[in-house]
Amino acid sequence: MDRNGGKTMAGTIVCYGDSNTYGYDPCTLMEDQYPEQNRWTGILESETKWKIENHGICGRCIPHTGSQIRFACEQLKDWQDKDAPVWMWIMLGTNDLLQEQQFTAKDTAQRMETFLKKLMAEPAVSSGKITLYLIAPARMEYGAWVDEERLYQESRQLGEEYKKVAERLGIGFTDAGKWDIPVVYDGVHFSEKGHHIFAQNIQEEITWLK
């Protein structure tokens, strides 16, 4: 039996996101990750034939500076050599709204489109070795981190704006904003139940996962 419990892997999915991909738990004293079995990435690893790699980083915005984009492009070179097929799921945008004063969903989508175009120009993607997939993040709710109407409303517009980007670029798209993901007191981070609901919904929507 191998390290995947004897499963034959279908390929690798690189989950490139922020704290809700990382599995951040703000309700513990250590403010660490939820246990792997209660993180959506870990759930997918156990319930599908895909190798799921968690590349979530707390506080990550959509890469938009030269150094951030160069680093992401360098990572592609490592990921392209993984077990084929290789997918890169990108779920970002929440921190852009939180950190950029007066940022709108359209602003966020424009930043995402610029980033995706940079990735698509890289040989790892243009050659078909890595396939990009865009996921609109779950909606924010009013809470300790979400105390203004802009955040609440613009997070609800991200899905439509991202859908337009995905259609223009011809890449796959899923809108997690439609899933009513439960969040904790801050209005941003998934609860454990939220991670399970996210995993269930993404398996239902992306049917080839099974």
Image (spheres, rainbow, N blue to C red):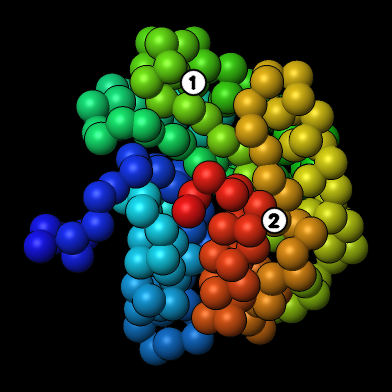
Q: Is residue 90 above or below residue 40?
A: above
Q: How crowded is mark 1: few (under 14 residues within 10 Å), some or many (20 or more)?
A: many
The residue where tag 2 is placed is 176
Left or right: residue 160 versus residue 14 is right
Query: Which residue type does callout 1 highlight?
Result: Leu
Question: Residue 10 appears at what percent x and percent y?
Answer: 34, 43
Q: Does residue 92 appear in this view?
A: yes
Q: Which picture quadrant has residue 24?
A: bottom left
**Which type of secondary structure does the marked residue at label 2 adopt?**
helix
> Residue at left 75%, top 37%?
162
Question: Residue 86 appears at what percent x and percent y?
Answer: 37, 33
The residue where tag 1 is placed is 119
**Which type of secondary structure does the marked residue at label 1 adopt?**
helix
> Residue at left 45%, top 44%?
16
Question: Which of 76/58 is in front?
Answer: 76
Along the polypeptide, which appears first: circle 1 or circle 2?
A: 1
> Residue at left 18%, top 60%?
6
